[in-house]
Amino acid sequence: MAVVFDRPKALLDVPTHYCPGCTHGIIHRLVAEVMDELGIEDRTVGVVPVGCSVLAYNYFGCDVIEAPHGRAPAIATGAKRALPDNVVFTYQGDGDLIAIGTAETVHAATRGENITIIFVNNAIYGMTGGQMAPTSLPNQVTQTTPYGRDVNYSGHPIRVCEMLSTLDGVALAQRVTVDTIPHIREAKKAIKKAFQNQIDKKGFSIVEVLSTCPTNWGLTPTEALKWLNDNMIPHYPLGVYKDVNTREEAK
Amino acid sequence: MGERVLMKGNEALAEAAILAGCKHFFGYPITPQTEVAAYMAKRLPKIGGTYLQAESEVAAINMVQGAAACGIRAMTSSSSPGISLKTEGISYMAGADVPAVIINVQRGGPGLGGIQPSQADYWQATKAMGHGDFHVLVFAPSTVQEMVDLVNLAFEKADEYRMPAVILSDGMLGQMMEPVEIKAAEPKTFDKPWATCGHGGKRAHNIVNSLYLQANELERLVKERFERYEKIKATEQRAEEYMMDDADIAIVAYGATSRVVKAAVKEARAMGIKVGCIRPITLWPFPTEAIEKAAKSVNQFLVCEMSMGQMVDDVKLAVNGAVPVEFYGRTGGMIPEPAEILAQIVELNKKGGAK
């Protein structure tokens, strides 16, 4: 019988620790499928963050470095500069990437560091139990904004793709999500492009994936997907914010 | 004998690092170590290496960790306030057993402090180079030649023991010029089967990591690391003894201070005072054996530092109450003069110590 669906080789056959309904599982799978399709697992080095996906080093089949909180782009820079023929990607959450790691993110981007960043934005600190993230929405209730995020008091959420797309070193800045089958397909295409860009030496590529956190949002998995659709997508519109490939085509 | 050239300490150290096989340098500007970065920026791109100016000290040390995790020799250099920022990364490297070399060209502190030479980071380097239970190797050069020799040794020992190594220099050694011989010997290298360099389809994936959520597993790993530290303490202590054979007074000093102390010892000897100097070359492991040996023959110790007294703690631990241990120091970027130390020696000689 023909196998039509199987586990990607680059995703190890081990149970994960993620909560039911969390979209990390889907995103891990997409990254692993892309590694398989591009045939790069054997020369790929993943860099995982501090946050819910810290244990991703147990799940990806490639070599993995676990970075200090926020420092994944700096670790990736060192790894890529050391062995430029390797493929280096980071997998980071919102607190890691755009709170404590803002400087590392912005400067890796502006250097045009030839790495791939998978940025999982679920608008909350998951691992520590649901505190306000730099991407928490206005009025969003979290453990540390119990009355809702008051932007006049706690500041405004950061739109990462929009911000990074202004930097010359960025090859790809695209926001996707994984709430529906068409969106998952779109997300995979973006992730594949972000890896292909690195192989083609085009520079810094970031794919922001809007994600859910049913546990800390206090919602069921299906309610969480609806909340993402109703609240996150309007604030963080999906789309390509910068793509050097289409600019080249347009020339 | 190779060619002797006149070089600045910081530049000689940088060239020696390159000859030790370090082709990747990540740094951030800070006085008084800037010559190391400037030298690397000039040299490394010409030999297929990487000099990268990071956005912060924090990023620089993590770039070092990323490169070193892939199995190559990498280095960063900074000065005291910058080293404080690097301690996060150094702790992670110690916890993941990643070898690399970190240069601290010390300046006065605390805070922004000053930019003049200092030895006030001894405690930081030897006791707490970041959070958690760990040590780093600490080497203390006292000449430009030793800047060269010890950076080579630091890379070798870091790889051998899979741990970060620190060169604890200071603004005086970094900035001074001396004749130096830089040997182009083949650097001693080590296999790194743990490196995250891509598994090539030939092995299971490697993970460089310092997270262990099970307390018993973390305890086991820390204990294993401390067994390694015991071996290092037993085999890697280094110290120079200067005029110690018949000494009644032993002065313990390292780095730039030891140069001043030696000048004072010579003058005191000319006055007939039996005084010598023990100069620790490794600060961790501390040369306890040299101090213990001296404690059996001298009747008092004087510890001289460019700080309010930090290494003196380790000397007292080694002497263990056998004879008195006195301290003399200048701080804030002040360098003691031989006459100041001579006055201390004369005073101690009058007192006569324990026996």
Image (tube, coloured by chain):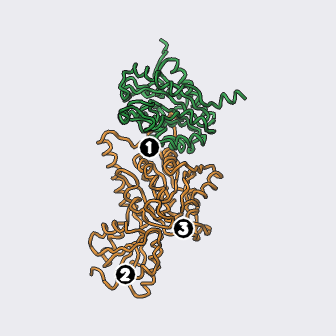
Q: Which chain is green?
A: A
B232 or A11: nearer the eye?
A: A11
Q: Colour of chain B?
A: orange
Q: Position of residue B321 (x, y in %)?
A: 26, 71
According to the picture, the residue beneath numbered tag 2 turns out to be B246
Q: Which residue is mark 1?
A: A68
Give the Cα distance between marks 3 and 2. Answer: 29 Å
Q: Secondary structure at mark 1?
A: loop
Same chain? Circles 1 and 2:
no
- SS at mark 2 in the image: loop
Name the kind of residue labelled 2 in the image: Asp
Query: Does the CB distance between marks 3 and 2 fall below 8 Å?
Result: no
Evaluate whether residue B186 shows in this view.
Answer: no
* Mark number, residue B337: none
At label 1, which amino acid type do we have?
A: Pro
Please tell me which of labels 3 and 2 falls first in the chain: 3
